[in-house]
Amino acid sequence: MIVIGTAGFPVLAQLPGARPELLPPDRAFRLSARAVDRDTLEVRFDIAQGYYMYRDRMSFRVEPVAAGAADLPKGERKHDAFFGDVDVYRGEVVLRVPLASPAAAGEALTLFAQSQGCADAGVCYPPNPQQIRLKVPAAGARAGDFVEARSGGLFN
Amino acid sequence: MRRRSFLAIAAGALAAGAAGGYVAWRSLEADRRDAAALLALTLPDLAGREQAISQWKGKLLLVNFWATWCGPCREEMPNFVRVQAANASNGLQIVGIAVDQPDKVRQFANELGINYPILLGGYGAIELSRALGNTVGALPFTVVVDRHGKVVFTHLGALHEPRLGELLQGWLSAA
């Protein structure tokens, strides 16, 4: 009888209610950023375990100062049946976005980020546009603190 | 006494699982949701013509939310092409709602030779899928509406053979 009871668990484990819940995108892919100095922003993604982001689907824009090309670190090579060999990020990713011209000390900037990722469980999240308000440090001051992206964006 | 009822529950769960309790469980869950929002929807097809979802009422309607940027969606779709071809005369109607840009959708639909209607939902279609139970807003997401207009199944993630075929046979053979 006990054997029947324990044999029931593998069946129960397959029920969707017993599956680990998938995370909403703003928890699977946590975005934060800071202004390092008048020329540079630093962007950080904390990617939950079991999730990944596409390197070539990240883009950044800054207002009112224009941004240069983001310095995207090398990712992990992943072979995708449809997209071929793609670079993906897992865990923590930190990258720098240079400003095309120096911002004023203390200036308020808005970073617009677009990114997209998937879960190893076999689902993908839509391209996620997010924004973060940052303040450029005063002349000679240390880099600003990381600011988290607001949740509740268009697709969060 | 306590031990006996636990065993009865465990044995019941085992029997239910073996007899397709998985489907029954999903149905209970999905029944609470309303297919009305889905059936009231009108979206443009790939030729730009507005198509009302309600035109397929009375069929077993499988609505698949997908996108070209979603690898698991692209992998899953040939399964839908196969089951649509095999079950068209049995009253199965698959409809794809693309959460994507029209030009990318058209190109992929042509490459794959999709044999069921693809409607252009845009990114806003994610919100519709949320209302149908896709709480995290990921893809692929599939909803099945039975001939009576009731949501009988929702699933986040790809559906593959043989499970897809088995599920469909169950609903198609139901009155």
Image: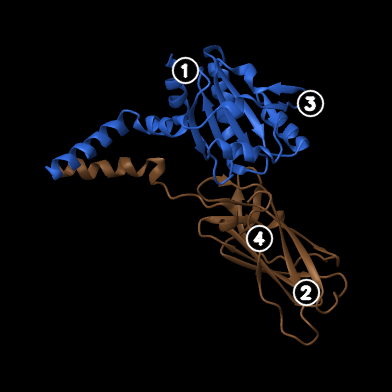
Say left or right for B52 vs B59. right
> How far is mark 4 from mark 2, CA to CA?
21 Å
The lab-note entry on whether marks 3 and 1 share a chain reads yes
| Among the 4 quarters of the image, the one containing residue B100 | top right
Disc 3 with disc 4 on a shared chain:
no
Label 4 is placed on what type of residue? Arg
Looking at the picture, the colour scheme in use is by chain
Residue holding disc 3? B48
Q: Which residue is mark 1?
A: B172
Residue at the far left in the pictured view: B1
Frontmost residue, A60 versus A132: A132
Amino acid type of disc 1?
Answer: Leu
Instruction: Indicate which label's residue lies in the foreground, 4 or 2.
Output: 4
CA distance separating discs 3 and 1:
31 Å
N-terminal label among 3 and 1: 3
* The N terminus of chain B, quarter of image: top left
Residue B147: where, in percent of width, then height?
51, 17
- Chain A, colour shown: brown
* Three-letter amino acid code of the residue under disc 2: Thr
Q: CA distance from mark 2 to mark 3?
A: 45 Å
Question: Within 10 angstroms of label 2, few (less than 14), some, or many (20 or more) residues?
Answer: many
User: Which element carries disc 3, helix, strand or loop?
Assistant: loop
Q: Residue beneath label 4, please?
A: A150
Give residue B160's position: percent from left, percent from top: 49, 33
Q: Which chain is blue?
A: B
* Residue A40 badge: 2
